[in-house]
């Protein structure tokens, strides 16, 4: 561990970085020289710092909104661990030089701008989000977020994330959404949701933070009130990667995390990923300060994958609004796509000329080359959008559903639509092996007097009771039953079943007693 100091920048390097910061002309910097397993956008005052494996950029955010903006510093590239101590020292010096350059440009050439939101208090309470930015360039800057992490595939978008905000309960609860998928243009994408609750003292409680882009942070601050608490309610990677960056964006926010956090292939502590929890959910010795307003119920299952993989999830019940909040245990599949999903993407996927369908037919995936498909004409745009959403939902849930149900998704989709279901990948890889534990947890959650259930993916229904939630877990009361919502389970689960059989063969998961 070494410290490099320049007149305007001080950067601490460590393979397991503490929460140490460098301030260069209002720019808050958290620099990683070495392994950078998580990406982040960090801002303070007039500055933004983005870091990710292999990329470190530091520049004032006001540059993005000026026509004569100097290019962001790109002096530092490839900060991954490698080479000997001389190489590492050279890279550390490059970091310091880059930050010093950013500092000098910031103090010498920066043009200060004032950004104002055109959203009024009346529009804030409407059903959809905020005003469009004044220009495409400023919009792009406000949504910048670099992320190349993920196993086996990085989670997309890789460079920019649009955020929408929707009022769920007037003055009480809001949904913040971003798009998230595995990329490659194959349609395996959906939304990821952060839910915000206003507590009795006016402060804000955040459930499962999403990427804290400048746009996201502005939308959250517009609600008014201190961002006082945040919870990472699961051990799943797609939510964990944003907890540390969110904590840095809101430094006074106390973060509580689900127990059993892990990483793969090396099981590293939370602090390595910039996560500094104030407490652990489910720990009776250290109850959270909001427990009189928000109850919780923890699902903690035995470890899988030689102890590396642990599925834990905490459900919450906000008493005042009668709202249950869950993460991945179940989702509500609506007839229409979440607003964050672009219609052009749905329209493209709904066409038989899209890349996904062409690849399916070219590779004759599960005999798809000889299966007839709707061939919806371009003139029927809404029909293509509806068809695209049905295909996208099946891809997101089954990952690789059967060819006939990709080409003609109606039957499989209708089995899932307008109800809560357990995601097939969660069911096959985890839940089917621990039916009693899952059933007991679902029953406890259903006993709350809920009027709505909010999951971290897919749409939020207008209303839902505990019974609606519990219906998704009927299979858990049987020794080997499959969710009835999977109307073509044998074919749609075939690819996932193959993965589970392989994992069982190497003892990474229990062996299936009965083939699904």
Image (cartoon, rainbow, N blue to C red):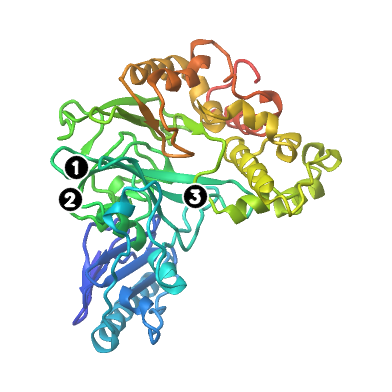
Q: Do callouts 2 and 1 mark residues in contact (Cβ within 8 Å)? A: no
Label 3 residue SS: strand
Q: Residues within 10 Å of mark 3 (few under 14, many from 20)?
A: many
Where does the image place residue 144, in percent across and percent down from the top left? 41, 65
Q: Quadrant of the N terminus?
A: bottom left
Mark earlier in primary sequence (2, 3): 3
Q: How many marks?
A: 3
394 shown above or below 218? above
Where does the image place residue 313, in percent across and percent down from the top left? 37, 31
Q: CA distance from mark 2 to mark 3?
A: 27 Å
Identify the residue at horizontal 26%, vertical 32% (top origin). 281
Task: Tell me the number on the disc at residue 226.
Answer: 2
Q: To which quarter of the image does residue 110 belong?
A: bottom left
Q: To which quarter of the image does residue 218 belong?
A: bottom left
Task: Tell me the number on the disc at residue 340.
Answer: none
| Nearer to the camera, 502 or 44 | 44
Q: CA distance from mark 3 to mark 1?
A: 28 Å
| Nearer to the camera, 136 or 16 | 136
Horizontal placement of 205 versus 338: left or right? left
Nearer the observer, disc 3 or disc 1?
Answer: 3
| Nearer to the camera, 331 or 429 | 331
Label 2 residue SS: loop
513 shown above or below 231? above
Residue tagged 3: 180
Residue 470 visible to the viewer: yes
Residue located farthest toward the top when viewing the structure as drawn: 478
Nearer the observer, disc 2 or disc 3?
Answer: 2
Residue tagged 1: 278
302 shown above or below 127? above
Q: Do callouts 3 and 1 mark residues in contact (Cβ within 8 Å)? A: no
């Amino acid at each position: 561990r070494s410290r490099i100091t320049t007149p305007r920048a001080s950067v601490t390097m460590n393979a397991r970085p503490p929460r140490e910061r460098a301030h260069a002309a209002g720019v808050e910097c958290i620099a990683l020289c070495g392994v950078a397993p998580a990406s982040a956008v960090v801002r303070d005052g007039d500055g933004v710092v983005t870091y990710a494996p292999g990329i470190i950029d530091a520049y004032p955010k006001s540059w993005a909104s000026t026509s004569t903006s100097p290019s962001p510093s790109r002096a530092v590239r490839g900060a991954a661990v490698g080479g000997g101590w001389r190489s590492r020292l050279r890279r550390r010096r490059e970091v310091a030089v880059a930050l010093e350059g950013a500092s000098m440009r910031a103090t010498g050439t920066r043009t200060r701008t004032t950004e104002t939101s055109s959203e009024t208090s009346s529009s804030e309470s409407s059903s959809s989000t905020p005003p469009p930015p004044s220009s495409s360039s400023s919009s792009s800057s406000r949504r910048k977020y670099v992320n190349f992490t993920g196993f086996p595939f990085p989670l997309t978008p890789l460079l920019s994330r649009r955020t929408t905000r929707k009022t769920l309960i007037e003055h009480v609860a809001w949904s913040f959404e971003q798009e998230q998928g595995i990329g490659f243009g194959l349609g395996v994408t959906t939304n990821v949701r952060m839910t915000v609750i206003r507590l009795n003292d006016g402060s804000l409680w955040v459930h499962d933070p999403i990427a804290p882009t400048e746009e996201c942070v502005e939308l959250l601050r517009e609600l008014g009130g201190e961002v006082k608490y945040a919870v990472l309610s699961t051990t799943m990677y797609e939510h964990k990667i944003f907890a540390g960056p969110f904590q840095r964006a809101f430094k006074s926010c106390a973060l509580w995390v689900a127990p059993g956090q892990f990483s793969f292939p090396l099981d590293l502590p939370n602090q390595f990923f910039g996560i500094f929890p104030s407490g652990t959910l489910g720990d009776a010795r250290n109850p959270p300060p909001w427990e009189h307003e928000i109850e919780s119920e923890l699902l903690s299952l035995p470890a899988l994958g030689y102890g590396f993989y642990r599925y834990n999830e905490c459900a919450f019940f906000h008493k005042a609004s009668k709202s249950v909040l869950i993460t991945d245990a179940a989702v509500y599949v609506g007839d229409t796509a979440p607003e964050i999903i672009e219609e052009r993407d749905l329209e493209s996927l709904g066409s038989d000329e899209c890349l996904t369908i062409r690849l399916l037919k070219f590779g004759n995936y599960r005999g798809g080359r000889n299966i007839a498909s709707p061939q919806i004409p371009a003139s029927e745009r809404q029909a293509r959008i509806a068809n695209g959403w049905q295909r996208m939902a099946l891809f997101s849930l089954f990952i690789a559903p059967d060819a006939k149900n990709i080409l003609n998704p109606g039957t499989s989709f209708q089995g899932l639509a307008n109800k809560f279901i357990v995601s097939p990948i969660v069911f096959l890889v985890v839940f089917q092996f621990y039916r009693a534990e899952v059933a007991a947890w679902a029953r406890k959650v259903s006993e709350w007097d809920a009027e709505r259930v909010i999951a971290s993916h897919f749409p939020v229904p207008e209303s839902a009771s505990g019974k609606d939630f519990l219906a998704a877990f009927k299979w858990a009361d049987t020794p080997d039953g499959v969710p009835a919502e999977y109307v073509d389970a044998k074919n749609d689960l075939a690819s996932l079943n193959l993965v589970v059989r392989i994992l069982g063969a190497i003892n990474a998961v229990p062996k299936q007693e009965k083939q699904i």
